[in-house]
Image (cartoon, rainbow, N blue to C red):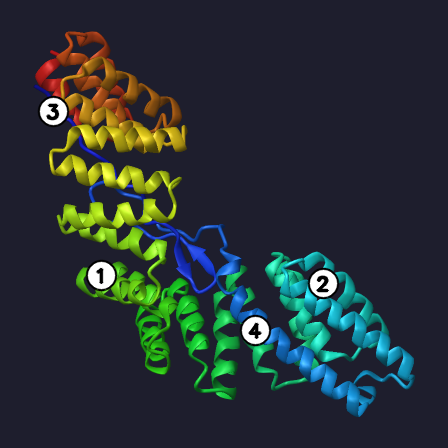
Amino acid sequence: MPVLLQCKFKKMKKIIISIFIFSSVIASHCQTVYSPANDIAMMDRFAAEAMRLQYYKDQAKEQNSRFSILNKTGLRNADDLKTTYQYYNQGIEKCRVQEFDSAVIYLDKAIKLSPEFISAYYIRGLSKQYSRDFKGAVSDYNKVIKRSADFVDAYYNRGLTKCYLQNYEAAIADMNKVINLNPDFADAYNIRGVAKRYAADNTGALADYTKALALNSKNTDAYYNRGNIKYFLKNDTGAINDYSAAIAFNTGFINAYFNRGIIKAALRDFEGAISDNSKVIDIDPKNAEAFNNRGIAKNELNDYKGSIADYTLAIELDQGFADAYFNRGAVKSKLEDYPGAIRDYTKTIEMSPGNADAWLNRGAVNIVMGQKSKGCSDLNKAVELGLLKARELIKKYCH
């Protein structure tokens, strides 16, 4: 009987880098591509930033009471000052409740009245950052820094925004400035580590994450990010330890469970992989990738019924999930449900016609079913796509 290729892990899921997300890899026989993702989880950090908003509101109130803001804004009219302050406060409140577009409108009005109002530029920059107007945010942070060269938060958020824009060297420069101004700013080391990681300075990134944790031993982002880089550097045990530490401080850290589950599966701890993927599903019942990966672990433990059930749920949640069709087809092949396997491999090919493994497996099943012509045609397609191992089956079954 032809030998079939087995299951495919979905790529390492949603690597959170402080407030933004990148993708990583799963090192297995089922390869995926390592590249930054476009998905950005903005709200993960918004609660912390919202706490800072009160500081800027209180600061402006204090300045208003002393009329020192008159000198900073160029205003000479107390009524204009009062109106500016009202617009500014309304902008902060809109930002606090995550109505960022409205916040920008109010802050525009404050800045029109007071073109030198530094904090207004800063809060407007935050609002643009969280509404994903990254270039606009950088422009506002530039205005802040031009007017106040030691404004630590402006450098920090400008560097963070440059990370979103994948301008990593510039992000590193901003975080260097933050650290020079405030050597104990743990998050700056974390974000500088992110930028170094994507600038291919893995050693520097690892050192920065470790420094961030030395300054704040409960920094879940830094544990998580260090776990990611340890995984990339093939330190699986160290990665698991860091993911576990992140989970210990944040029991709802879904991506840490997801990635830890992938590594456990790679280390053949399939029970552990099932547990971690089950936790992901508890937190996010619509996570198709977790169902897929749990199905793989169940397959490895010979729980074929449970495996097929998980793949089916993954497909119900994401009908374009080619890997889940492929994996379900592989299990159906084991169970000698050859027509079902053919259907699943055919769906995989329809969605991913360049998937040589699917052509090979469908070809092998066709041969088992006595459909030699169809099977050999599929095997030849697999060879055409670069899967040279299909030649062995062609030599054995097609001549």
C-alpha separation, residue under disc 4 versus residue under disc 3: 64 Å
Viewer-side label of 4, 1:
4
Question: Counting residues from the N terminus, which is met first, the one under dot 4 or under dot 2?
Answer: 4
Check residue 240 in the rendering and tell me which mark sits there, or answer none.
1
In this view of the protein, can residue 100 be seen by the observer?
Answer: yes
The x, y position of residue 24, in whole percent, is: 34, 53
- Which quarter of the figure has residue 70? bottom right
- Which residue sits at x=35%, y=64%? 250
Disc 3 packing (10 Å; few <14; some 14–19; many ≥20): few
C-alpha separation, residue under disc 1 versus residue under disc 2: 41 Å
The x, y position of residue 32, in whole percent, is: 31, 44
Question: Counting residues from the N terminus, which is met first, the one under dot 2 or under dot 3?
Answer: 2
- Which residue sits at x=25%, y=50%? 276
Relative horizontal placement of residue 163, taking residue 29 as reference (left or right):
right
Residue beneath disc 3: 392
Type of amino acid at the residue the image marks with label 1: Ile
Viewer-side label of 2, 3:
2
For the residues bearing labels 4 and 3, Cβ distance under 8 angstroms: no
Check residue 103 in the rendering and tell me which mark sits there, or answer none.
2
**Label 1 element class:** helix
Relative horizontal placement of residue 334, taking residue 252 as reference (left or right):
left
Question: Counting residues from the N terminus, which is met first, the one under dot 4 or under dot 3?
Answer: 4
Residue beneath disc 4: 51
